[in-house]
Image (cartoon, rainbow, N blue to C red):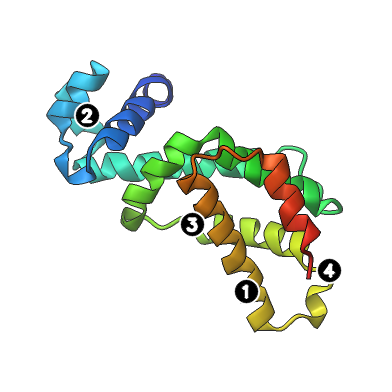
Amino acid sequence: MKWERLKKEVLFPSLETLLNDCKPGDLNFLKLSNATGISRTTLYFHYETINDAFIDLLQYFEQELQNRLAKGRDSENSHDDLMKVLLFVRDNYELLKVVKKIYHLRPIGNDLRSTVRAIVLSSLIEDSSNCGEFEVTFVWNGFVGVIRKWLYEGCVTAPEDIHAALILRKI
């Protein structure tokens, strides 16, 4: 339990800061130890390589999003669920910049991707039973593009405005 709390309160925020300041290949356990105050021995005890620490950060990110989506999930109101996704993106802007750098180490799990995809599609497509795979692909890739643009611009646009723009253009 102590290690889990230490990861959440010290290790992951420090990893996030370090990865925002430099490339993943420039990090090692010595730099991470200096930034966190956690001994290299402890880091080596829990991780074989620095990439294992990155993967642990990705798993933490994925779990946090799953938890946010699970709270009060309302399959009848997909618009609220879409707003939860947008609020998570805004609230975790710095972490998402890091995730983008290390995503190749462990792609987001299929369960999470399926959950977010279902929320997006049910929010943006009136009747998916009448929608072909090209329309579904168009809507999903459009949503991903909007999120990328929003992140690139620093999430300065309010999530409510992004939500309104997406819902306004329902297929």
Where's residue 152, x and y in %? Answer: 46, 47
Classify 81 as above or below 10: below
Residue at 77% x, 59% y: name it.
123
Q: Amino acid at mark 4?
A: Glu
Q: CA distance from mark 2 to mark 3?
A: 25 Å
Q: Is residue 10 left or right of residue 170?
A: left
Q: Quadrant of residue 155?
A: top right
Q: Which residue is mark 3?
A: 109
* Residue 152 visible, this orientation: yes
Q: Amino acid at mark 3?
A: Gly
Q: Which residue is mark 4?
A: 126
Q: Which residue is mark 1?
A: 138
Where's residue 43, x and y in %? Answer: 22, 29
Residue at 81% x, 82% y: name it.
130
Mark 4–mark 1 CB contact (< 8 Å): no
- How many marks overall? 4
Q: Is tag 1's residue or tag 2's residue first in the polypeptide sequence?
A: 2
Q: Is residue 51 left or right of residue 162?
A: left
What kind of element bears circle 1? helix
Q: Amino acid at mark 1?
A: Phe
